[in-house]
Amino acid sequence: MSPSPSRPPSGAAPAARPPQRLTPMLRQYLEIKAAHPDAILLYRMGDFYEMFFDDAERAAPILEVQLTARQKGTDSEAPMCGVPHHALDAYLGKLLAAGLRVAVCDQVEDPAEAKGLVRREVTRVITPGTVSEPELLDGKEENLLAGVVWDGDDRRGGGGNGGGAGAFLDVSTGNFFVRRWLDAGEGVDDLEVLRPREVLYDEAGLPEPVRGWIERRVPCSAALDGDRLFDRGRAAELLERHFGTATLRGFGLAPGEPAVRAAAAALAYARETQHSDLAHVRSLALRESGERMVLDPTTLANLEVFRGLREGGRRGTLLAVIDRTVTAPGGRALRDWLRRPLRDPAAIARRHDAVGELLDDAARRERLRELLAGTGDPERLLARAVLGSLTPREAAALRDGLALVPEVLARLAGCSSQLLAELAAADPLPALAAELARVLADEPAASAAEGGVIAEGVDRELDDCRSLARDTKRHILSLEAKEREATGIGSLKIRYNKVFGYFAEVTKANAHRVPDHYVRKQTLVNAERYVTAEIKELEEKILAAEERRLALEERHYRELVARVAAEAEGLGALAAALGALDVLAAFAEQAARGRYARPRIDPPGAPIDVRAGRHPVVEATSREPFVPNDAELDSESSQIVLLTGPNMGGKSTYLRQVALIVLMAQAGSFVPAEAAAIGAVDRIFTRVGASDDLARGESTFMVEMIETANILHHAGPESLVVLDEVGRGTATFDGLSLAWAIVEHLHEHGRPKTLFATHYHELTELASVLPRVVNRTLAVKEWHDDIVFLRRVVPGSADKSYGIQVARLAGIPESVVARAAEVLANLEAGEYDLSGRPRIARGGGPEPAGGDQLALFAPEEQAVASILRGADVDRLTPLEALNLLHRLKARLR
Ligand code: ADP
Ligand code: MG
């Protein structure tokens, strides 16, 4: 297929700058390139893969190789660069990371035998979203290709939701699911969370924010406007045929809806680029949010679940701290569980039961984890088999992994928790395991074409060929002995070279004793070389046996790979079971190491009650001993907790710790606390005031407000809302007023459980007005002019912000600190200016000239003040007074 990319295609057609004269080689290159205009073409020449023209210019800086020219200075000069063939994978990785598609063009006939130009063909097309080579993938991460379709203006033709949909396919595992989106915001959120490596989208009707996100965030995308991949009529049919179902209703999908077209496009594209039927893609899941907690991308970012806010890497994230999985499928499952925690208390309890059982039995857990570590990545190996690219060594890895499964399952026998008992009943695929063990050599060679891949005893003929090959030496020696005896030449040797094959070599001195039936082949300085009919016959036998051996090995290997691919369903299910088991064992392991407790999950809406909770990441990474804190949120009495306290007091940490405990609990993990009871939450929202969020580089007050608006619209009584310094991104009074109104709204509408950290102590007055608002503060101890952070959350509110003490801790010069204390004293002493605002300039020094105030207020206000100051009220008539009032008001407007 040839999608028409929305941007300059990754490998623009070289025709843009054709050389004047085409060599046959370049003509062949251009023909092949024409079939892959949107990919970088790697063209095999000798030991190198070469790129030409625009491809070369584009790739050279990415690959960090030198850009040169072929046939420099002639009229067929062409820019080119190349990479050694043996290092292909490393270079492929760089091209893919840069978001480029790559077509690998190999020589498909032996150059030694070719007449004229060697025949070449594209043998693989690799794209960022469809790559399945293990060397090019991060085992613990998904690698998603996405199709994105919007309903456009024709709302009747589709599934009737009028929105859009995304389909997400992981070719390397066969995982395939769709998401329906009601609006652009949902679409962008999903894309942001799932981060597909490659996106195909239908331009028709696509909302601007979605298109914008794709163009900004996905280096490899293609707009497939009106492309047959999105064809409404054929989409359902394509999927039905692939899954062998008569209708898509079983998947919960309607034939013409965007989800179906998106899924069909992704599947068709992957099948075409991979030249495979993708039989390991066995089902299409409609992932609806009903069963799962919704975590929007901002929340995942603020809570640093997968990526740190500052560096964007894995360090300092929840995942980095709790990921004790020992397999790649386990790692992927863990990400999925954290990204989409459960909501049903019973389903969550099943996970907790299993974790608890594995926690209590350390010996069992340890042995299981050891065994699991050896099971490898059956999911991705299956995908490789289906794609026909499973190497013999990967097959051996699958064999060795499967061999461990019965023991893994045996270790689960007798487990009482329902989930572990279910996992114990997984099918270990004994027939496939036996077949792999029987057919595959113990340590197979890297490629079936080299032989040495199939075990002894699989095929009698193969064994015979092998023994002949092994016996070649013996046959030759016996023939040699026979000829020596017949000719009486004791130094006669039978030898081999590539040009003549086998021959008898006789020294010059003995040449006259050679019998007539010896045919001379070659004369050397000191020796003559001959062949005989018998030597030829032996040679043919040896070569035929060798050829036959390789053919048989390849055939058996191909059959074996097909056998693996045919087991798609069973292997997929087994891989999923092992992945889940790995996560449960990892949760137990982390619970043991981190002294986590089992949380109790109560029905939605019930209180959140955490005893002595800790922040899992700060506790693991900070040098200070961590101070545990309780948290109580209750829709009836303490729906909204207003948290005040000095900067650096621990407010943000506390907020995040409560949210993370809820998230972990519902993902099935134990939690860093002495005890916790959690009313199941449907969504967690977190927003962080703009100035706290500069690290993201894109946050402005506007973004903060958009995100807050989203919360006000969507948070309900089963949601948890975490607001950290919201309103800070604007002027003090604006910010305070907004924060005030937001708290009031959350109190009256939606009524989500809310944690609100703020440095506006004025907000704490809300607690006296609104019945479900409570004040908490982070305790500090004052010590002369210094403060000590106690990190303890206590009832009440901070009466000061201790900004000056914190500034001193931070190393602000003592003179500045002292002056600040003085200004503060003035403010607190209630020195006010004419307009009723605190007078702050008075200090030890002289009054500023003119006795005027610092320009704290807007010029209009100052102007009004000075008019008022100048007005002689005693001598104004009532009408003049009214006019003055009008004028002043007008100025302020
Ligand atoms: P705030 O939001 O009030 O400015 P933070 O939550 O950012 O404060 O906390 C500042 C630092 O204090 C954190 O980086 C952390 O190292 C430390 N800290 C916070 N809470 C605790 C705690 N409960 N125990 C120990 N150290 C803590
Ligand atoms: Mg903070």
Image (spheres, rainbow, N blue to C red):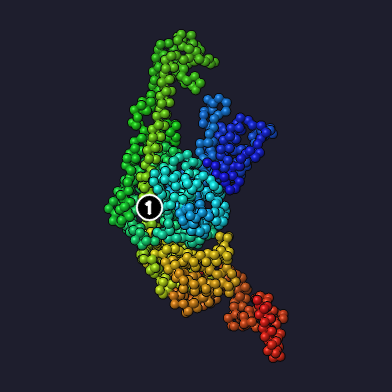
Does residue 837 appear left or right of residue 579 in this picture?
right
Q: Position of residue 368 (x, y in %)?
A: 34, 50
Question: Badge 1: few (under 14), some or many (20 or more) residues near its Cα, within 10 Å?
Answer: many
Closer to us: 736 or 800: 736
> In this picture, is 55 found above or below 630?
above
Closer to us: 595 or 209: 209
Q: Which residue is mark 1?
A: 580
Label 1 sits on what residue type?
Ala
Q: Position of residue 371 (x, y in %)?
A: 35, 48
Residue 81 lies in what quarter of the image? top right
> In this picture, is 240 found above or below 767?
above
Residue 553 visible in image: yes
Assign the C terminus to one quadrant of the image.
bottom right
Which residue is painted at 35% across and 64% down in the image? 600
Which residue is painted at 34% across and 37% down in the image? 435
Mark 1 CB in 8 Å range of ligand 1?
no
Closer to us: 695 or 230: 230
Residue 404 lies in what quarter of the image? top left
Residue that lies at the very extreme toward the front in this rendered image:
156
Q: Secondary structure at mark 1?
A: helix
> In this picture, is 152 found above or below 489?
below
Residue 378 visible in image: no
Closer to us: 1 or 597: 1
Q: Position of residue 186 (x, y in %)?
A: 49, 58
Residue that lies at the very extreme toward the bottom in this rendered image:
874
> In this picture, is 75 found above or below 585?
above
Q: Position of residue 369 (x, y in %)?
A: 36, 51
Which residue is painted at 61% across and 75% down in the image? 820
Which residue is painted at 37% across and 38% down in the image? 563
